[in-house]
Image: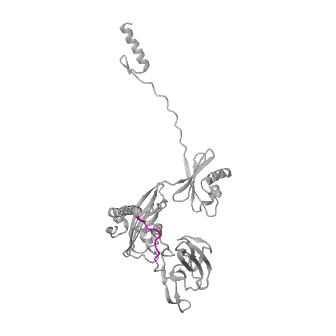
Amino acid sequence: MDRNSRVILGFLVLGAMGAVPYLAGALYVPPPPPPAAPLIETPHQTVDRVPIPEGSTMDQVLASAGLDATTRVEILNAFNSAYDVRKVRAGRDLLVTRWDKTGEIAGVEYVVDADHQVQLFRDNGISSAELVEIPGTVKLVPVCATLKDSLAATMDRAGESFTLAMMMADVLAFDIDFYRDPQPGDDFCLLVEKKFYENGQAPTYRRIVAARYNNAGHISDAYWFADATGDGKGSYFGGNGESLKAAFLRSPLEFDARVSSHFSGSRLHPVLHEVRAHYGTDYAAPTGTPVRAVADGKVVGAGMSGGSGNMVTIRHADGYQTQYLHLSKILVREGQSIEQGAHLGLVGATGLATGPHLDIRISRNGSYMNWEKMRAPRTVTLAGGMKDQFLAERDQMLGQMKTALQNAPKAFAGFPNIAAIN
């Protein structure tokens, strides 16, 4: 093959492969692109908020949203597989999602609590539902403040809810009587697990991991220690490794009561007007205030008892017995076992009483004791390597409190003394 033939053949091959942008000096023009495919319109959805009225059933709520009977039955069966429809609570809403063009149901949502919701999806007339956790992030947040008036108002100034005050009172219930002990000038600092939600709902509290309360110079502190029992449940301990749980709570009530009468061998009875021994401690509180058992035990008496009014008697370990007098309502029955902190009745003025109050009495082996002066022993004290581990964790928590106060002291409602955290 001569030279001219080889050149012509080479051009033909390369041209067929589309690799030559220029041919014989002319500009190569690519073919036009194929016509674009028609756009597919994305279906849209609308969301309706359907209220759940008092006394209505789930079926009635779905009917009020315009669902036919067949669809309601199908959705109810799927919903019930994830969450009992009988537990759906009035005052909340169902979120019902529909396809715009057809009006068909695409999904249903119901918020069970702050952390969980039922999500129901519907496709081609078939529903599937599951109980899912509402997404969010748990952060360890410091909350520190100084009391100027009530604990509730102080928490509000610190940007927190009264729920956190109740949690703190529960953690320190064995050391502080939150009815009588708090006073203006007290200060406290907490480290609390707080969950912040992606959907923008109000944050909620998980657990207080550290608490320090300065009550007129007396420091009460508590630190959560997960390895205390070896079962992963954990418990609260004071700064030196002693269990915060004592055999008895410091108070049978929770908040806002004063001691109106003390233990005495001779007291002028307010109704009978004669001098008698008063073997109890009286807490003045509004009628209906819940009364809690100060220790684990067994109810050995629950009923009307003359001048004592409605009375509950609980037998505890080691010969101890407590009595709760003048109740407006009894919430337990004789023979029932009761746990420390459980509600046993409501404050009242039954029997010989000039006004609503609780008279609590404690005895051991038949001899009455002064409730206000009694201090029950702790149930557990850490020792050895367990205590060393606890102290290391305690120091870490205290360091976090101190750092928070140093970095943002204005956020803590005037907490006065960073150096006091030690």
**Residue 28 visible within the image:** yes
Is 202 left, or right, of 77 in this rendering? Answer: left
* Magenta stretch bounds: 375-383
Q: Is residue 376 magenta?
A: yes
**Picture quadrant of residue 305:** bottom right
| Residue 193: % across, % down | 44, 61
**Residue 292 visible within the image:** no
Q: Is residue 242 magenta?
A: no
Q: What kind of secondary structure does the magenta stretch mostly adopt? A: loop
Is 294 left, or right, of 415 in this rendering? Answer: right
The foreground one among 152 and 183 is: 183
| Count of residue discs | 0
| Residue 338: % across, % down | 57, 71
Task: Identify the residue shown where x is 49% and y is 73%.
Answer: 249
The foreground one among 84 and 214 is: 214
Q: Tell me if residue 109 comes above or below residue 191 in the rendering.
A: above
Q: Colour scheme in the image?
A: one colour
Q: Tell me if residue 367 comes above or below residue 335 in the rendering.
A: below
Is 169 left, or right, of 298 in this rendering? Answer: left
| Residue 292: % across, % down | 54, 73
Q: Quadrant of the N terminus?
A: top left
The foreground one among 335 and 217 is: 335
Q: Quadrant of the C terminus?
A: bottom left
Going by the picture, which residue comes out furthest to the bottom? 274
The foreground one among 367 and 267 is: 367
Is 357 left, or right, of 381 in this rendering? Answer: right
Task: Identify the residue shown where x is 49% and y is 80%.
Answer: 371
**Picture quadrant of residue 214:** bottom left
Going by the picture, which residue comes out furthest to the top? 2
